[in-house]
Amino acid sequence: MKSVAIVGGGIMGVTVAYRLSQQGFKVTVYERSPHLGGLTAYMDYDGLRIDRFYHTILSSDLSMQTLIEESGVADKRHFTSTKQGFYDKGQIYPFSTPVDFLQFPPLNPFQRFRLGLQIIYAQTESDWKKMDVVPVEDWLVKVSGRGVYEKVWKPLLRAKFDTISGDVPATYIWSRLRRMMGTRKGVTSKEMMCYLENGYYTVVEALVAKAEAKSAVFHVNAPIEQILIEGGQAVGVRVGGTDHRYDAVVSTLASPVLAGLLPGAPASFTQSLGKQEYLGVICPLLILRKRLLPFYVLNITDESIPFTAVVETTNLIDPKHVKGYHLVYLPKYIAPDNPMAEWSDEQIKTEWMKYFRQMFPNYDEKDIVEFEVQRARYVEPIRPMNTLDDIPTIQTPVKQLYMGNTVMIYPDLGNGEAATRYAEKVVAQVIADAPQWVHQSVGVS
């Protein structure tokens, strides 16, 4: 039986473990956090399991839907249609249906027409590599025009990329449009999403249980100190000062984190991993007694407001599944040099609430039960234009060391669907190579 250590227990790592255990591999997963799941982990509140960050599962997310079905939690899945809006110059406008689109006040009729052309164009364009060398602003302005760019696209880019959107290739908006339009059903063009009772972690724990039934082992609070390399080959991991030997190692860690665990790897490889930059996120969660908005997401065009959207997930999740609470996330993606990364939770609360009151002056603050600041350092890889050669491959220069992370899913967006779909590629590579592995030891958990 071939033994494999998986370093990182996020959604990609858990999926790899599940698939490899199905194929008869002896799998051991090491996760440094108290919980598996990575960005899909949860927080405990009032006997509830609440997602630390908001997550979207679309009706068209075939990989995620398959895992939900296979893991036996389809009865916990609920589909619904969602709405979105825009906050512009102190006013809130719906932006969900064709009627909303045609009546959107911040744009004139000609601008609305050009916005529609942009959406259609994204569906017909299939050569994403051609767009990798085109600045996203140029691509959008060419079809949508400057007015639409300033009112619609620029705020969305600011929301996702903070101050670095000027070097972002057109592929990012192209990917978003193609993914979101794939969920719209019928003449109403309703956007279909689903959620899982007890949070996104429901599918994670179900996959873990399935893998454990196949003898996979999962360790939490188990930070890897080093990936062991002998003679140019990965032979195991060091945890808590103890070496554990395996036939192969699969890393799902962020590239800079992996770089620090490979003292025996070629310097050119670790240097390339170490220079990969990521956006982080500050994402306060408001737990409310009453509904705030009718929208799942409210996009914000006002650049003076620090958070870039209002995401009320209980317009997707039935509040009865969270004890009647209403959950609102106020995200801010931050570039590596953004000083907000060093702000205290209290400073964030003070600044965020100032603008929350400005946007929602009639909301009674007595109905705010909690303000919980959530953070993550490695969220969205920064992929500048024309840097495809910098993307690492599943097979690394170290024999029998494999990797998969969100840097490698490009041009897909960083989400559970793309991560789990890429996990299948990692698994396929491991299975293909395993017969040729040089056997070093029997796996130890």
Image: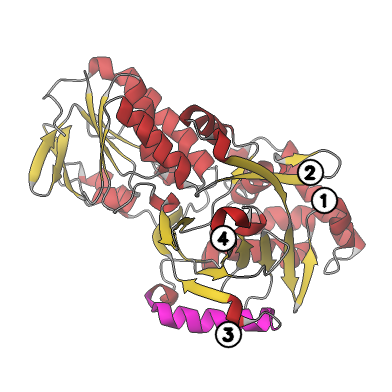
Q: Secondary structure at mark 1?
A: helix
Residue 407 to residue 439: above or below: below
Asked whether residue 394 is in view, the answer is no
Image x and y of residue 440, in percent: 11, 24
Image x and y of residue 330, in percent: 56, 68
Tell me how far mark 3 sits from mark 4, CA to CA: 22 Å
The answer to whether 28 appears left or right of 175 in the picture is left
For the point 49% across and 34% down, the residue is 421
Tell me how far mark 2 sits from mark 4, CA to CA: 22 Å
Does residue 360 show up magenta in the picture?
yes
Residue 429 to residue 5: above or below: above
Q: Which of the marked residues, 1 or 3, is nearer the chain's N terminus? A: 1
Residue position marked by numbered label 2 in the rendering:
120
Residue 135 is labelled as none
Residue position marked by numbered label 1 in the rendering:
116
The answer to whether 120 appears left or right of 356 in the picture is right
Q: Which residues are magenta?
A: 342-361
Tell me how far mark 3 sits from mark 2, CA to CA: 39 Å
Residue position marked by numbered label 4 in the rendering:
160
What type of secondary structure mainly makes up the magenta span?
helix
Asked whether residue 5 is in view, the answer is yes
For the point 26% across and 26% down, the residue is 215
Whether the residues at callouts 2 and 1 have beta carbons within 8 Å, the answer is yes
Whether the residues at callouts 4 and 1 have beta carbons within 8 Å, the answer is no
Tell me how far mark 1 sits from mark 3, CA to CA: 35 Å
